[in-house]
Amino acid sequence: MQKIVIIGGVAGGMSAATRLRRLDEEASITVVERSGHVSFANCGLPYHLGGVIEKRSSLLLQTPESLAARFAIDVRVRHEARAIDRANRRVTVRDLATDEDVELEYDALVLSPGARPVVPRIPGISVAHTLRDIEDLDHLVASARDAREAVVVGGGFIGVEVAENLVHRGVAVTLVEATDQVMAPLDPEMVEPVHDAMRAAGVRLALGVSVVRIDPGEPGEPHLAHLSDGRAVPAGLVVAAIGVRPETSLAAAAGLALGERGGILVDDSLRTSDPAVFAVGDAVEKRDGLDASSVLVPLANTANRQGRVVADVIAGRPGVDRPVLGTAIVEVFGVAAAAVGWNEKRLREAGRPHRVIHTHPGSHAGYYPGAEAMALKLLVDPGTDEILGAQAVGRDGVDKRIDVVATAMAGRLTAGDLADLELAYAPQFGSAKDPVNMLGWVDRAVADGDVETLQWHELDGALAAGATLVDVRSPREHAVRPVPGAVNIPVDDLRARLEELPDGPLVVHCEVGLRGYVAARLLAQHGRSVRNLDGGYRTWAAGTAGQRTAERVGAPA
Ligand SMILES: Cc1cc2nc3c(=O)[nH]c(=O)nc-3n(C[C@H](O)[C@H](O)[C@H](O)COP(=O)(O)OP(=O)(O)OC[C@H]3O[C@@H](n4cnc5c(N)ncnc54)[C@H](O)[C@@H]3O)c2cc1C
């Protein structure tokens, strides 16, 4: 009989434990969990804070009793693993209720201790809350009861979710983010709808600013958060959400190898540097799906998948851990933002050549009620047509499109292959030419040289070099949403008014890029040198709005 001990009883740990039982009825399986709960829904925590998930009990998916009954797993909550004796294959575990230590023997040990929130080292930070487990949530809910104002430090996934849910509770929120945008996986021109939605809901976004000191308030009085731009924001509640770091203290003390990013080092079978010790989830370094480099991707899907793979390996089945693409999604005040693979910022930093495609399709057929516009971005290797990444932002249909692209990436389809995907269609769900197909067509048009595109941030340079910008939208659109310097010739009039165009290179633009493409094809066939502004006015407007924020952020206070 194999003795298996698992440290950490939530996403990765509990997936491993239950799959192991399904594979091996004889094994002794013990799960050691420091907090008071196992298998709780960490991803749901912010939504109980805001009352969206009304009952706290909805977050508790299993109990030690239910796991014992169905899976014969010995689950020990409020027990902390304190040391690993690798030579004798024992773990020292402390019962936090009695402070007594017990020794657990193992044949295989699985570490799934997760990650711990990074807390900025600033004076007064001890008043700040973090959110990782049910106990954290209970403290946060208790403090939020009397708070009228809150400061959320950090604009990542958890920061924006906490900000949204505090607003749902009627708390006035200032979100402080050190960079010039929230949601780092998105490129600047894609994140603007998220900023807009947060501001419209009343969140004060302090971008490019850090909290430098917190003066704790007297009882009944708010704290005062001092920002790097000199402002002081009163806050009954401060939440620190600037990211997480792999929880590696136990592994490091046991002499297990850590990787270059500070996570536990594992091989494709999720074995650590000790063949009897495995590790999964947020605590481990993963292999990047694009370049196989070491990355930290603290996401639930990966932790759960790795939990299953490690169970297979321990049970003697073939199990291989796949590289990660970091597919992720968040919703903030009705706007969903999703990403997969690398973003343009990262591709540029790595000096990796890339083709960029922006589109603004409807979530479903425009003639069927309720269609919402979304913004899609596809990043493609211009040499191989490999999909390098994608981003999607909008109120509807975003999850479906990013998941299709993530699936295409996992299956090694090229960007051009997206054009041929046969996707389910009825007018309330999509379009007969689905937005994902459309990305494929645009990619092929660019790859085949049918059209040359220009990115929003390249426009000023092209105009300075002497290009003429032609807005091919209607006069009304041109008047209401102008790009400075453009002359207006609607696409339907273009054929008849060709002689009005000055000599030299042309850039055409429309609202989203489609009429611009038609105009560019027409002009190219009349012998003109022409580029289409990718993503049209909408991408340009979002990009330049982000640029203005970045310039404000970069300017001296
Ligand atoms: C508020 C919040 C929202 C999130 N939302 C999303 C989301 O929407 N989508 C998404 O993909 N991911 C989300 N995540 C991330 C996701 O929850 C994690 O990636 C996932 O839970 C990681 O699984 P894990 O098993 O590695 O660690 P965890 O699930 O964190 O479990 C680790 C457990 O190990 C225990 N532990 C640590 N050390 C010891 C020890 N020495 N002894 C005993 N027990 C120990 C801890 O108490 C902890 O309960 C969210 C996380 C949080 C906190």
Image (cartoon, helix red, strand yellow):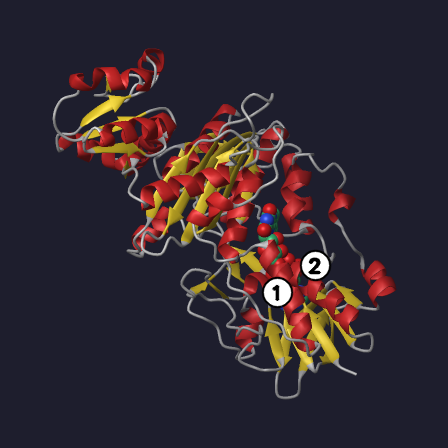
Circle 1 crowding by C-alpha within 10 Å: few under 14, some 14–19, many from 20: many
* Residue matched to label 1: 306
Residue 368 image offset from top left, x and y in percent: 60, 22
373 shown above or below 455: above
The residue at the point 28 percent across, 56 percent down is 351
Relative horizontal placement of residue 82, taking residue 553 as reference (left or right): right
Residue 358 image offset from top left, x and y in percent: 39, 37
The residue at the point 59 percent across, 63 percent down is 281
Is the C-beta of the residue carrying label 2 under 8 Å from the nearest atom of ligand 1? yes
Residue 86 image offset from top left, x and y in percent: 61, 84
Frontmost residue, 421 versus 18: 421
Q: Which mark is residue 35?
A: 2
Q: Which mark is residue 511?
A: none
Point out the frontmost of discs 1 and 2.
1
Secondary structure beneath label 2: loop
Seen as rendered, the residue at the extreme front is 525
Whereabouts is ligand 1, in terms of quadrant?
bottom right
Frontmost residue, 37 versus 354: 354
The residue at the point 38 percent across, 32 percent down is 231
Q: Quadrant of the C terminus?
A: top left
Secondary structure beneath label 1: helix
Can see residue 545?
no
Relative horizontal placement of residue 487, taking residue 176 as reference (left or right): left
Relative horizontal placement of residue 88, taking residue 449 as reference (left or right): right
Residue 451, quarter of picture: top left
Q: Which numbered disc, 1 or 2, marks the residue that appears first in the sequence? A: 2
Residue 13 image offset from top left, x and y in percent: 68, 65
